[in-house]
Amino acid sequence: MTASRRRLRRTTDRYQWEKDRALLSEDERRRAGAAERDTGLTREELEFSTEFGSVPADAELARWFGVPEGTRMLCRSYQTRARGESAPLSLARSWLVYDMVAANPALLSPENEPWPGGTPHQLSTIGIEIDRVVDEVTVRLPRPKEAEILDVAGDLPVLVLRKTSIDTMGRVVEVAECVLPGDRTEIVSTTRLAPWPRRDR
């Protein structure tokens, strides 16, 4: 096990940053993505691997998306690692309704990853704008396969972050789960508060 590895700092203001980038040109979007932002590394210092497949929605996925069980889903698995390190920074899986995504066939191909602008831009190509994102974080011990891939001890807790993206029509359009090593991950949540009404003095 490596004593010291790249740390990952994930902030909730990343979602507005990603949404804003979806409107930029491809050249601008290619300069940096969320992984570069979270790690402080350049694109050249990172390695990406992606696997795509389709699965029928089980009871849990159907409940998350509000679709019938058995609905065809696109499942995407991602690993991102710093070059020279043997273990990825995280393990991520993302689900989308297959027929929705198929409106742009380019979104079905892992060869197009990493996609400049990420999921917000991908969804924009099929007319979807993300309105809000809900993050839910839980802590548990890693499953044996997770511990092996992340190169962590079986008694070291991992953070499991479930991200639910909801569009401007109120539909859940993506659910993603990210498993993060507890010893090298920092999650920062910023909540903007509306000002009090001004009072006459």
Image: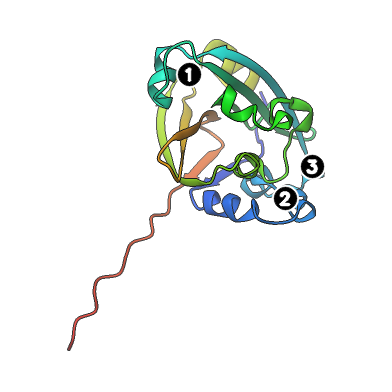
Residue 114, by quadrant, is: top right
Whole-number angstrom distance, CA of label 1 to CA of label 3: 30 Å
Q: Are marks 1 and 3 in contact (CB under 8 Å)?
A: no
At horizontal 33% and vertical 61% (from top left) the residue drawn is 193
Q: Position of residue 115 (x, y in %)?
A: 72, 39
Q: Position of residue 75 (x, y in %)?
A: 60, 21
In this rendering, does residue 163 appear at all?
no
Say which element carries label 3: helix
Whole-number angstrom distance, CA of label 1 to CA of label 2: 34 Å
Say which element carries label 2: loop
Q: Which amino acid type is shown beneath numbered disc 1?
A: Asp
**Residue occupied by mark 3:** 45
In the image as oriented, which residue stretches furthest toward the left?
A: 201
Sequence-wise first label, 1 or 3:
3
Give the crowd class for mark 1: few <14, some 14-19, many >=20 residues within 10 Å.
few
Is 173 situated left or right of 92 in this image? left
**Residue occupied by mark 1:** 155
Is 17 situated left or right of 25 in this image? left
Is 32 situated left or right of 14 in this image? right
